[in-house]
Image: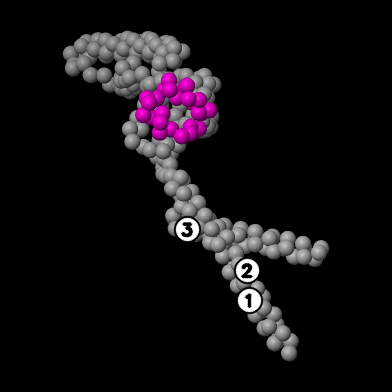
């Protein structure tokens, strides 16, 4: 008997639910389609974004000064972007970020760009470094560093000449071919390698050193169909909630009467 009553109760409840769906069918369909359309539009607006990241440091520009030149860019200041990048690049930059890394006691800058397109942005970091090179303080610092390296290079060349003259005198006194040997040979090789290193520094004064560069793509988390289904289901449940509120309000009103 109890089982039959339960079955009757379920049937009555199902009948009421079907009647409510029939009664508010247009409302439910409108909400469902609104959800599906909104889900599709949301997917279309959630476009693919591209991220470019660079970690770098300066060989002789103090970190606080370098950080101050990059701060405005990290705040997405349009005026600063306009000074650094060409028009085509600016249109593709959605956001920029600045962070710092500490490795083995040395500070590194990490700058990242979120782009809506990667066309003609392969040289974005070169544009940034060109901007930094144009800053008067950095120009002066580069010139001073070049002068310092040239002075060191001159001292290395003088020392090499002294070693060559010293060894030539020893060899010539013994009527042998002038070849540098022994401890002087090691010193000569070390100085010669150091000379090549400083010649490169004078010729190509790299103020900034790239440590790491990467490119990544960020895609929408779900497919177009799933996104539409998700929004459609949410709106469908919302329509049921609204129906429940309407019917509950009617019930309260009839009880008061």
Q: Residues within 10 Å of mark 1 (few under 14, many from 20)?
A: few
The quadrant in which residue 117 appears is top left
Instruction: Report the residue marked by disc 1.
Output: 15
User: Disc 2 and disc 3: Cα gap in Å?
Assistant: 28 Å
Which one is closest to the eye, mark 1 or mark 3? 1
Task: Depth check: give the residue in front, 111 or 241.
Answer: 241
Q: Which residues are magenta?
A: 73-97
Question: Is residue 107 in view from this perspective?
Answer: no
Quadrant housing the N terminus = bottom right
Q: Residues within 10 Å of mark 3 (few under 14, many from 20)?
A: some
Q: Residues within 10 Å of mark 2 (few under 14, many from 20)?
A: some
Q: Is residue 40 magenta?
A: no
Where 117 sits versus 41, above or below? above
Where 158 sits versus 35, above or below? above
User: Disc 2 and disc 1: Cα gap in Å?
Assistant: 9 Å
Measured from the top left, where is residue 194 in percent x and y? 34, 20
């Amino acid at each position: 008997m109890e089982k039959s009553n339960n079955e009757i109760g379920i049937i009555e409840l199902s009948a009421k639910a079907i009647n409510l769906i029939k009664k508010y069918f247009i409302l439910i369909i409108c909400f469902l389609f609104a959800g599906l359309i909104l889900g599709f539009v949301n997917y279309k607006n959630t476009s693919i974004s591209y991220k470019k990241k660079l970690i770098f440091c300066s060989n002789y520009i103090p970190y606080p000064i370098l950080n101050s030149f990059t701060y405005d860019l990290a705040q997405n200041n349009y005026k600063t972007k306009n000074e650094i990048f060409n028009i085509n690049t600016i249109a593709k930059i959605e956001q920029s970020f600045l962070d710092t890394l500490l490795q083995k006691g040395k500070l590194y800058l990490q700058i990242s760009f979120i782009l809506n397109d990667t066309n003609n942005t392969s040289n974005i970091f070169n544009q940034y470094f060109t901007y930094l090179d144009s800053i008067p303080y950095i120009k002066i610092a580069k010139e001073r560093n070049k002068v310092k390296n040239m002075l060191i290079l001159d001292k290395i060349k003088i020392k090499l000449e002294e070693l060559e003259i010293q060894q030539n005198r020893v060899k010539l006194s013994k009527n042998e071919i002038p070849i540098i040997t022994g401890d002087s040979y090691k010193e000569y090789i070390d100085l010669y390698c150091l000379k090549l290193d400083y010649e490169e520094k004078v010729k190509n004064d790299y103020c900034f050193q790239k440590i790491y560069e990467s490119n990544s793509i960020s895609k929408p988390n779900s497919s177009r169909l799933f996104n539409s289904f998700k929004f459609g289901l949410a709106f469908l449940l919302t329509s049921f909630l609204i129906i429940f509120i309407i019917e509950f309000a009617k019930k309260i009103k009839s009880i008061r009467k």
